[in-house]
Amino acid sequence: MVTRPELNTRLPIDIQPEVYFALRTGQPIVAFETTILSFGLPQPLNMEVALGCEKRARDLGVIPASIAMLDGRIHIGLEKEQLEFFCSKNSEIRKVNPQNFASTLAMGKPGAFTVGGCLMVCALVGIRVFATGGIGGIHRDWQVIPDVSSDLQALSRYQTITVSAGAKSILNIPATLEALETLGVPVVGWNTDKFPLFHCPTSQYPVSARFDTAKDVAEFAKLHFQLNTGGILLAAPIPAEHAIEFEQLEKWITIALKEASEQQVHGRDITPFLLERLEKHSAGKSLEANTELIFNNSTIAAQIALELAKL
Ligand code: PSU
Ligand code: MN
């Protein structure tokens, strides 16, 4: 069952009743993306992650809202069968970012949203907290092909807190952080002074501010939003017991990048390609880390949503 709310828009949006009710009454909500399910994780782990993230929110009394595009409509809050579809690896499913959002909608194709796509949807209805694994960024060989994820501009544009484990070191991390500074996106550390690298909890790169409690993050976010700005990137380190050692990871990434270059993988395909190669080379170790950090981010996002709802 879905509710078609009277939003300030004629866009085709279906919101699950409990999400709609929560929006109307100011109850805490956390949004989740679907590209990670359709393109980032293998079966059957993707479904485990989808349900596990939603459960982490619910356990804290927060309403989960996974976001995707289906039959020419934007869906905020997905039923179990819809999550199963986005975990099915159906070849019709498109990876949807801000660039192909409207065209995919117009064609009525199913779409799994990236971080950037999800942030657009969050802004349409006023969802302020969003959890993911890692954001996209500037790719390592950007000097040759300027591959800059549309996640970055979306982060700067839409007023939502994105909780991620930093960014994967398949990217050019210093370039990505410079771009976020240029775009005016605060990169805030959750109990850390250093920007985490997805599988690795730390790096040499400082964050722009550090907050240690959900209440502190919520108070800071409220101030930031009042300044008529865009979003915030909250970088939460992977729990130490699931981390992968930096040197080991670099070896796998080097091989994966070489394979991508040999096979001439570009554009929207490169992130999923590199993730799949990493999984192979690490014999699944990267997957365990990936799963645990997403769950961790979901719990942190839910704690922040609870605090934001009190302000
Ligand atoms: N980084 C990851 N795992 C992912 C993604 C990024 O470690 O699954 C996904 C996210 O959905 C992100 C998208 O928004 O890839 C970025 O893709 P691109 O680089 O094509 O913008
Ligand atoms: Mn790209």
Image (spheres, helix red, strand yellow):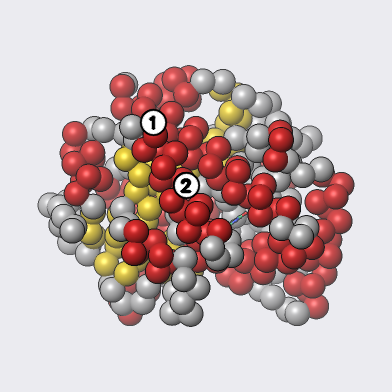
Quadrant for the C terminus in the image: top left
Mark 2 or mark 1, earlier in chain: 2
Determine whether, in the image, residue 57 is placed left or right of residue 254. left
Ligand 1 sits in which quadrant? Answer: bottom right
Q: Which residue is mark 1?
A: 60
Residue 123 seen from this side:
yes
Q: Which residue is mark 2?
A: 52
The three-letter amino acid code for the residue at tag 2 is Gly
Find residue 60 and report its image quarter: top left
The percent coordinates of residue 248 (x first, y second) are: 85, 50
Residue drawn at 58 percent across, 70 percent down: 268
Circle 1 Cα neighbour tier, 10 Å, few/some/many (<14 / 14–19 / ≥20): some
- Which element is circle 1 on? loop
* Number of on-image labels: 2
Q: Is disc 1's CB within 8 Å of ligand 1?
A: no
- Height in image: 96 above or below 309? below
Q: Nearer the viewer, residue 287 or 223?
A: 287
- Which element is circle 2 on? helix
- Height in image: 301 above or below 183? above
